[in-house]
Image (spheres, rainbow, N blue to C red):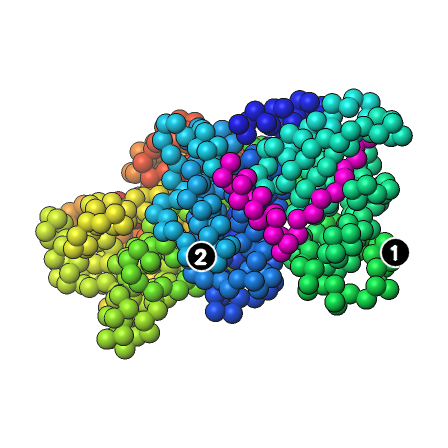
C-alpha cells in the first residue's frame, strides 16, 4: 500500500520524489541512531527536558519525511511514538523503564521498515502489538508484554499493517475528540489552480497517514474562481501540514481560514508559519495557541495547543495582536538550519576513485624524483625546485584526501551501548560501558571490517569476564561491572582496547583446556603465551553452550580478521581483576610509510611501524642452533634470524657477496632479525592488493610500484615472525 501511494503521489504531483529517497533514508538512519543513543543515556529517575525534546525531534523528523514519501507504516508508528514522547516532555507522564524498552523496540521496527522500503526484500513488520503498547502507555495503562517486536512476519506480511489501520484511525479519532489533544476544525483553501485535480492529492494524503485527521470537500464558491475548499479536522499544526502539502501544490496557493470566516492567506511562504490564522482559530474554539505563534514547530516546543482551561485565564486579551505583528522567530529558525549546508554527501566509490588517482600521482612523483637525482642542480635549478614543490604538494594532497576517508571511532562505539544493555539483561548482569577516544579517526574501510571483531570481544567480556552481581559483591567489587572501549593513536597505528574489571583469565584452566584439545601446552609457557591459547580454533572455556557463546567459534576468527587487516592482537590479564585485549591496526590500507631494503637485484618493503632498528653484523655473530636454525645476539638477547634471500629464493649473481645488514622487526609480540644486503631508504608507498591482482603469496601482504616502474613486494611481518617460531 505504501509503495502504491508513493507512486500516486509522485506521478500525479509531477514531482519525482524517488530522487530524494536516499537522502531521506540516510537522515532517518541517523535520527534512529541518535534516538537510540539518547534513550540509552536517559536518566529515568530525573529525565532532562532537553533530552526528551531531542528524542521527540528525532521521531518528528522521521514522521515528516515518511509522510511526505507515502511510507504510511513508518508514519503511523512514529506518530504514535510522537504522542507518547510529547506527553513525556510535557510532564503529563513520567518516564519508566518499560517505556524506554518499547521505544527502543519501536526503533528496531522502524529500521526494519525502512530497510524494506529500500528494497531489502524483507517481509513487512507487524507493529500491531507495539502500537497497542504505546497507546496503552499514552492512556496511563500498563503495557502488554512484547517478546520480539521487530521480528518480521513470514509470508502474508505485506498487508500486516493494514488490519491495524481502522483500529488506529478509530483510536486517533477518539483521541482527537479530547480537548487535550488540540483537535480543531478549519477551512482549507487551495488555489487558484490550473489543474484542480492537484488538490485531490491532499485528500489522498489524509487517507494514507493515519492520525493526520479528516478532510472533506466543501461546495465551490463562485467568488473564488479556481479555488478548492475543504473542511479539515486535525490536531496537527498548520506548519507541519504545509510541509506535507508543499510536495503537491505551491505553498502560496494554500491558506487556512476559520470556518465561515474571511480568507487569511498563509504567512510569509518562505517560512511556512501560520501564527495569525492559528490564533484566530484558537480564539474561536476558546483555545488560544500556546506561545502566541512565536514558537510554532521550534525545536523542543509542543506542536499542539494546551487545554483551554490552562490558557484562557492566563492570557491577557491585549496580547493577541502580537501574534500577527511579531515575526522574528521564523528567521531565527531559518538560520539555524544553515550549518547543514556545510557538509556534502559523497558516495564511497567516488572517494575510492580519488584515492586511487592520488596513489598513481604519488608513484609518478616518485618516478620523477628518482630520475632527477642525476641532474645538475645548478643547471636545472628551476626544475629541481619545481620537483621539490611537487613532492611537498603531493604529500599534502595525499594526506588531505586520506583524511576524507577517516571517520571517528564514535561511529563504531555508538552501536555497543544498546547491544550491551540487551546482553546484560539477558544474562542477568549489571554492566556499564565506558568509551574513551571516540574522536580518534580510522580509515572507513578498516572501520567496516573491525566492527565484527570488536563486537565479539565486547560480548566475550560481558559473558565470560564480568561476574554476576552477587559474585562481585562477595569479592568486594561494586555490583555493576565496567567494560571500557578505548581508542588512541600510537605512532603510525591506532590501538583499540577492550577492558573489563571481571574475573580475568585462569592460567591453570586454560592449560587444562588446551591439553584436552590436544594442544601442546607445557607449564613452562609464559603468561602471554598462555593467554594466546584462547585464539586456537575451537577453543572455549565456557562450561556450557548457550546462544551467546561456548561453541569455540569466535576468538580464532577475531584474530584471523584482524591479522588480515595488517593488525595484531595482544592480551593482558590478571586473575580476579580483569582482562585487556589490545588491537593494533594501521591507520589506512591505501598508503603506508615503508622502509625499502635490497636483496640481490630485488627490492622489498617493510612497514615502517614494524621496524625496530637496523645494524651491521659479522657472519661470526650469527650462531647456528639445532642444525638449521640461526640466531643473533642483540644486547644480551638472542633473536631468530631470517634470510630473505632463502625465503624468496632470490637469484644471486655476485657469488662473493655476504649480506651484513640486520633489520629487527616485531609483530604479534615477537621479534626477528631479517638479513638483507642494503637499506635503500624510507618512502611512502601505495599498497596494491596482490591477492586480487595475482594470487595469495606466503609472507607477502601486498605490492607497490617503485619510482623506476619496478614492482616491490610488501612483506607480511607477522607471517615472518610466525615462521621463526615454527
**Image: magenta residue range:** 165-192
Which residue is the site of mark 2? 141
Going by the image, does 399 lie left or right of 501? Answer: right
| Residues tagged 2 and 1 counted as in contact (Cβ below 8 A) | no
126 left or right, relative to 505 = right
For label 1, the residue is 325
Q: Position of residue 7 (x, y in %)?
A: 61, 24
Above or below, comparing residue 309 to residue 178 in the picture: below
Query: Could you say where residue 310 lies in the image, as x and y percent from the top left?
Result: 68, 64
Residue 263 falls left or right of residue 207: right
Q: Position of residue 536 (x, y in %)?
A: 22, 48
Please tell me whether residue 347 is drawn above or below residue 407 in the rendered image.
above
Mark 1 crowdedness (10 Å alpha carbons): few <14, some 14-19, many ≥20: few
Compared with 312, 657 (above or below) is above
Name the residue rendered at 51%, 32% in the picture.
Answer: 117
Can residue 35 be seen?
A: yes
Secondary structure type for disc 2: loop
Residue at 72 percent across and 30 percent down: it is 217
Q: Nearer the viewer, residue 94 or 229?
A: 229
Instruction: Name the residue rendered at 49%, 39% in the picture.
Output: 167
Q: Residues within 10 Å of mark 2 (few under 14, many from 20)?
A: few
Alpha carbons under labels 2 and 1: distance apart: 43 Å
**Image quadrant where residue 332 sits:** bottom right
Question: Is 115 contained in the magenta span?
Answer: no
SS for callout 1: helix
Amino acid at each position: 500500500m505504501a509503495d502504491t501511494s508513493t507512486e500516486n503521489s509522485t506521478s500525479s504531483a509531477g514531482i519525482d520524489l524517488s530522487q530524494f529517497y536516499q537522502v531521506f533514508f540516510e537522515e532517518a538512519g541517523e535520527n534512529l541512531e541518535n534516538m537510540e543513543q539518547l534513550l540509552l543515556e536517559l536518566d529515568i529517575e530525573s529525565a532532562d527536558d532537553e533530552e526528551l525534546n531531542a528524542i521527540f525531534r528525532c521521531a518528528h523528523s522521521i514522521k515528516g519525511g515518511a509522510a511526505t514519501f507515502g511510507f504510511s507504516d513508518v508514519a503511523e508508528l512514529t506518530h504514535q511514538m510522537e504522542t507518547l514522547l510529547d506527553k513525556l516532555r510535557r510532564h503529563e507522564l513520567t518516564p519508566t523503564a518499560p517505556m524506554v524498552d518499547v521505544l527502543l523496540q519501536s526503533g528496531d521496527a522502524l529500521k526494519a521498515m525502512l530497510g524494506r522500503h529500500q528494497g531489502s526484500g524483507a517481509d513487512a513488520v507487524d507493529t500491531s502489538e507495539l502500537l497497542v503498547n504505546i497507546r496503552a502507555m499514552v492512556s496511563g495503562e500498563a503495557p502488554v508484554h512484547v517478546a520480539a517486536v521487530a521480528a518480521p512476519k513470514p509470508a502474508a506480511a505485506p498487508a500486516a499493517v493494514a488490519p491495524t489501520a481502522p483500529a488506529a484511525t478509530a483510536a486517533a479519532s477518539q483521541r482527537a475528540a479530547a480537548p487535550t489533544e488540540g483537535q480543531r476544525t478549519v477551512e482549507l483553501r487551495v488555489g487558484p489552480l490550473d489543474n484542480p485535480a492537484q488538490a485531490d492529492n491532499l485528500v489522498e494524503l489524509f487517507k494514507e497517514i493515519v492520525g493526520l485527521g479528516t478532510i472533506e470537500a466543501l461546495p465551490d464558491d463562485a467568488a473564488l474562481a479556481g479555488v478548492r475548499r475543504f473542511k479539515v479536522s486535525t490536531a496537527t499544526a498548520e506548519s507541519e501540514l504545509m510541509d506535507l502539502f508543499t510536495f503537491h501544490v505551491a505553498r502560496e496557493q494554500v491558506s487556512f481560514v476559520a470556518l465561515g470566516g474571511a480568507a487569511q492567506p498563509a504567512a510569509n511562504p518562505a517560512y511556512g508559519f501560520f501564527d495569525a490564522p492559528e490564533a484566530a482559530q484558537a480564539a474561536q474554539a476558546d483555545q488560544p495557541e500556546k506561545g502566541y505563534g512565536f514558537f510554532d514547530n521550534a525545536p523542543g516546543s509542543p506542536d499542539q495547543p494546551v487545554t483551554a482551561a490552562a490558557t484562557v485565564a492566563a492570557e491577557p486579551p491585549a496580547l493577541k495582536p502580537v501574534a500577527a505583528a511579531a515575526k522574528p522567530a521564523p528567521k531565527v529558525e531559518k538560520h539555524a538550519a544553515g550549518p547543514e549546508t556545510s557538509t556534502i554527501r559523497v558516495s564511497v566509490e567516488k572517494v575510492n576513485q580519488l584515492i586511487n588517482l592520488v596513489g598513481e600521482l604519488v608513484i609518478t612523483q616518485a618516478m620523477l624524483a628518482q630520475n632527477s637525482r642525476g641532474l645538475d642542480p645548478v643547471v636545472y635549478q628551476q626544475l629541481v625546485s619545481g620537483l621539490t614543490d611537487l613532492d611537498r604538494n603531493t604529500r599534502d594532497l595525499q594526506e588531505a584526501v586520506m583524511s576524507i576517508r577517516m571517520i571517528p571511532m564514535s561511529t563504531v562505539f555508538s552501536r555497543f551501548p544498546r547491544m550491551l544493555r540487551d546482553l546484560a539483561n539477558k544474562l542477568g548482569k549489571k554492566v556499564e560501558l565506558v568509551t574513551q577516544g571516540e574522536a580518534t579517526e580510522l580509515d572507513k574501510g578498516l572501520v567496516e571490517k573491525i566492527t565484527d571483531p570488536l563486537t565479539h570481544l565486547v560480548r566475550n567480556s560481558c559473558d565470560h569476564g564480568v561476574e554476576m552481581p552477587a559474585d562481585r559483591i562477595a569479592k568486594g567489587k561494586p555490583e555493576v561491572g565496567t567494560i571500557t572501549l578505548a581508542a588512541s593513536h600510537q605512532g603510525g597505528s591506532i590501538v583499540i582496547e577492550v577492558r573489563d574489571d571481571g574475573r580475568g583469565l585462569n592460567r591453570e584452566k586454560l592449560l587444562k583446556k588446551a591439553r584436552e584439545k590436544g594442544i601442546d601446552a607445557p607449564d613452562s609457557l609464559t603468561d602471554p603465551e598462555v593467554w594466546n591459547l584462547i585464539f586456537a580454533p575451537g577453543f572455549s572455556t565456557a562450561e556450557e553452550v548457550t546462544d551467546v557463546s561456548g561453541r569455540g567459534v569466535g576468538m580464532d576468527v577475531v584474530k584471523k580478521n584482524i591479522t588480515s587487516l595488517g593488525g595484531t592482537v595482544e592480551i593482558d590479564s590478571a586473575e580476579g581483576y580483569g582482562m585487556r585485549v589490545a588491537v593494533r591496526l594501521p591507520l589506512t590500507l591505501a598508503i603506508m610509510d615503508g622502509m625499502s631494503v635490497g636483496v640481490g637485484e630485488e627490492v622489498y618493503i617493510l612497514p615502517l611501524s614494524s621496524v625496530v632498528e637496523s645494524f651491521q653484523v659479522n657472519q661470526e655473530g650469527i650462531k647456528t642452533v639445532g642444525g638449521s636454525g640461526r640466531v643473533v645476539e642483540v644486547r644480551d638477547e638472542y633473536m631468530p634470524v631470517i634470510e630473505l634471500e632463502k625465503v624468496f629464493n632470490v637469484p644471486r649473481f655476485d657469488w662473493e657477496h655476504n649480506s651484513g645488514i640486520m633489520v629487527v622487526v616485531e609483530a604479534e609480540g615477537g621479534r626477528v632479525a631479517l638479513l638483507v644486503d642494503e637499506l635503500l631508504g624510507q618512502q611512502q608507498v601505495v599498497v596494491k592488493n596482490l591477492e586480487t591482482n595475482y594470487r595469495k603469496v606466503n609472507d607477502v601482504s601486498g605490492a607497490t610500484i617503485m619510482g623506476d616502474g619496478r614492482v616491490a613486494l610488501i612483506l607480511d611481518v607477522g607471517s615472518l615472525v610466525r615462521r621463526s617460531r615454527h
